[in-house]
Image (cartoon, rainbow, N blue to C red):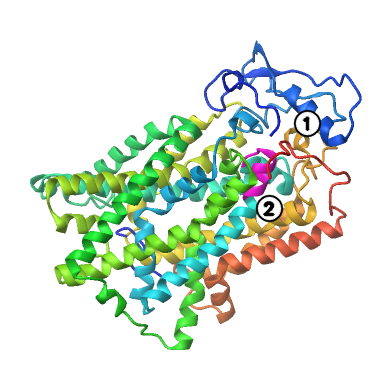
């Protein structure tokens, strides 16, 4: 019920850049062994000198992942050995980033979020809340508050990525164990695959709109019971699915370029749409007249589940944001880039609400879908430009939010078999298997079954990871131990699994299950307390799992590392 319209139906030494092995495509190389040659004045200076030497690759090509593991050096001044990571735990996609690979500025991080925010699902957010009875400003305020909460989680989780240069699957090894990290990363990947299918289906509908009327009215547009949609719509879906693979194929550098150059284009097109609606409707008087239809108690009963659903919208990125911040130039760049999220979300949901409300004045009916709105506007070239804009918005959201995390999770599962590209292709295939056209038939199933439901999985993972990093480990990680299967290793725990983390995960999820089962129709009635827990699934699971993990860790004696550890790249203020 939260959204009837939300569904789519809804610096250290920096070597020459050419000498650094590219993370996705260039040949792998050995790094030289650290050999201290003179006394050092301080441990920090020693660590920097040692790592400076370690970052200079030799010209010896590396063997295949299956025959010889990648090598990189420890960041410690007193460790003169090359770290030989276990071949089942490392490859070029999982190793820590080097100084030369840290190219994301604050603007490029912000551009990433502009590309993510400007999309069709975001267009509906505030309007869906107004449909449920909120005033226009209450709907926008709810979205902004939710994204302030999300931004805090993003910055806190992103810190580890920038400090140590590791992706989320490697960071998760610290809390869940070397082998146990597969569970949270695959849960995150599963959600990403579902979202990939949803966004791709929306892009396919944009292609469908461009087709001649004679084709759209043919027998091919009639739905097939076994397929759940028409062959024509399914073909448009597959066409858009194929188009996205070209962008994904270039890896993180290709994604960065797409996001950076798409951001100003998307902002310009959004401004044009807003100006058009303002001129045609004679202002935003109709939107401003949308007052609340709720009593005080009704508003608060709607506010919290709506807040949860909106936090869930980016709860996926709040987990795997280290996949991106590991490329940030500094902590300042990652914080500045992510601080714009509440602003971007507030502005774009305002645009969606303003344009949607103006359609009542312009066309005599409310048109909540931007793609249907384009069909009403008419004009061949207008439609071409608008469809290209919508396609660009979908692609920038999909490849950044829904490809990187699943691809990295699959690489982490088997580094010798998977590369980023292979993981991305498998992610796209699983997106088809989710059959998003069925999920989007009901907006209530989209919000309560999908958004709120998966927040119960991602919330406790986030709580455990942040509790471990800040309260248990004190932001000090032993990088070489994250890539080691040594039974005496810091993060090996019990046979590679940290059972305290998994117990906290289960306890965080269990109380949400009755509400989920009621929502999908398995249970008819449940005690009110479980309904409230489900309506606040992300908050409940995040804080309960984090608190339980903290208590269990203290009881087991794992409070902090015994020694102070220098970050891999300490010059990241």
For the stretch drawn in magenta, what is the main secondary structure?
A: helix
- Tell me residue 308's x, y (percent): 52, 67
Give the magenta range.
Answer: 158-167
Query: Within the image, what quadrant is residue 367 found in?
Result: bottom left
Report the residue marked by disc 2: 465
Of the 4 image quadrants, the one containing the N terminus is bottom left
Q: Which of these two is toward me, 201 or 33?
A: 33
Mark 1 burial class by Cα count in 10 Å: few <14, some 14-19, many 20+: many
Instruction: Tell me the element at label 2.
Output: helix
Q: Is residue 200 visible?
A: no
In the image, residue 563 sits, relative to residue 270, either above or below, namely above
Residue 192 on the magenta span = no
Q: Nearer the viewer, residue 414 or 34?
A: 34
Q: Label 1: which residue?
A: 48
Mark closest to the chain's N terminus, 2 or 1: 1
Distance from Cα at disc 2 to Cα at disc 1: 28 Å
Q: If the image is split into quadrants, where does the C terminus sit?
A: top right
How far across and down, in percent of the image, does residue 311 sit?
Answer: 52, 63
Q: Are marks 2 and 1 in contact (CB under 8 Å)?
A: no
Residue 499 in the image, given as x and y percentages of width and height: 75, 52
Name, please, the residue furthest toward the left.
214
Residue 286 disc label? none
């Amino acid at each position: 019920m939260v959204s009837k319209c939300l569904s789519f139906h809804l610096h250290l030494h920096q070597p020459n850049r050419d000498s650094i092995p590219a993370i996705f495509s260039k040949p792998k190389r050995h790094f030289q062994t650290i050999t201290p040659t003179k006394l050092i004045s301080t441990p920090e200076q020693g660590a920097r000198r040692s790592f400076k030497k370690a970052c200079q690759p030799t010209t010896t090509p590396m063997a295949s992942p299956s025959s010889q593991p990648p090598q990189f050096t420890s960041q410690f001044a007193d460790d003169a050995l090359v770290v030989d990571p276990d071949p089942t735990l490392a490859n070029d996609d999982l190793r820590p980033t080097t100084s030369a690979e840290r190219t994301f500025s604050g603007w490029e991080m912000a551009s990433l979020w502009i590309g993510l925010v400007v999309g069709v699902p975001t267009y509906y957010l505030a309007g869906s809340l107004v449909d449920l009875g909120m005033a226009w400003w209450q709907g926008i305020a709810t979205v902004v508050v939710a994204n302030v909460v999300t931004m805090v989680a993003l910055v806190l989780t992103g810190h580890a990525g920038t400090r140590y240069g590791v992706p989320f699957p490697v960071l998760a090894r610290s809390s869940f164990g070397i082998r146990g990290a597969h569970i949270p990363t695959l849960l995150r990947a599963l959600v990403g695959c579902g979202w990939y299918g949803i966004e791709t289906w929306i892009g396919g509908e944009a292609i469908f709109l461009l087709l001649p009327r004679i084709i759209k009215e043919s027998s091919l547009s009639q739905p097939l019971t076994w397929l759940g949609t028409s062959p024509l719509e399914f073909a448009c879906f597959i066409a858009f699915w194929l188009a996205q693979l070209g962008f994904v194929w270039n890896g993180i550098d290709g994604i960065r370029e797409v996001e950076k150059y798409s951001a100003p284009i998307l902002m310009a097109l959004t401004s044009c749409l807003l100006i058009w609606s303002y001129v045609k409707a004679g202002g935003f008087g109709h939107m401003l007249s949308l007052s609340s239809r709720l009593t005080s108690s009704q508003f608060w009963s709607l506010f919290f589940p709506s807040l949860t659903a909106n936090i869930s919208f980016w709860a996926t990125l709040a987990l795997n944001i280290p996949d991106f911040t590991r490329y940030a130039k500094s902590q300042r760049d990652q914080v500045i880039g992510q601080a714009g999220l509440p602003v971007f979300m507030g502005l774009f949901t305002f645009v969606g609400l303003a344009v949607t409300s103006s359609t009542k004045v312009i066309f005599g009916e409310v048109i909540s879908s931007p793609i249907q709105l384009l069909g009403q506007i008419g004009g061949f070239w207008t439609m071409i430009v608008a469809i290209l804009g919508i396609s660009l918005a979908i692609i920038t959201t999909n490849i950044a939010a829904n490809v990187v995390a699943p691809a990295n999770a699959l690489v982490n599962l088997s580094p010798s078999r998977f590369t980023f590209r292979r993981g991305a292709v498998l992610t796209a295939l699983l997106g088809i298997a989710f059959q998003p056209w069925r999920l989007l038939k009901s907006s209530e199933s989209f919000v309560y079954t999908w958004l709120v439901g998966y927040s119960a999985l991602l919330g406790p993972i986030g709580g455990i990871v942040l509790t471990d990093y800040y309260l248990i480990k004190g932001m000090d990680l032993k990088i070489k131990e994250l890539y080691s299967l040594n039974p005496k290793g810091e993060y090996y725990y019990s046979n590679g699994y940290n059972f305290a983390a998994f117990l906290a995960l289960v306890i965080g999820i269990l109380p949400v299950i009755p509400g989920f089962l009621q929502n999908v129709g398995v249970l008819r009635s449940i005690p009110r307390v479980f309904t409230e827990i489900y309506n606040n699934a992300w908050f409940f699971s995040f804080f309960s799992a984090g608190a339980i993990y903290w208590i269990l860790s203290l009881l087991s004696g794992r409070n902090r590392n015994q020694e102070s550890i220098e970050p891999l790249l300490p010059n990241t203020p």
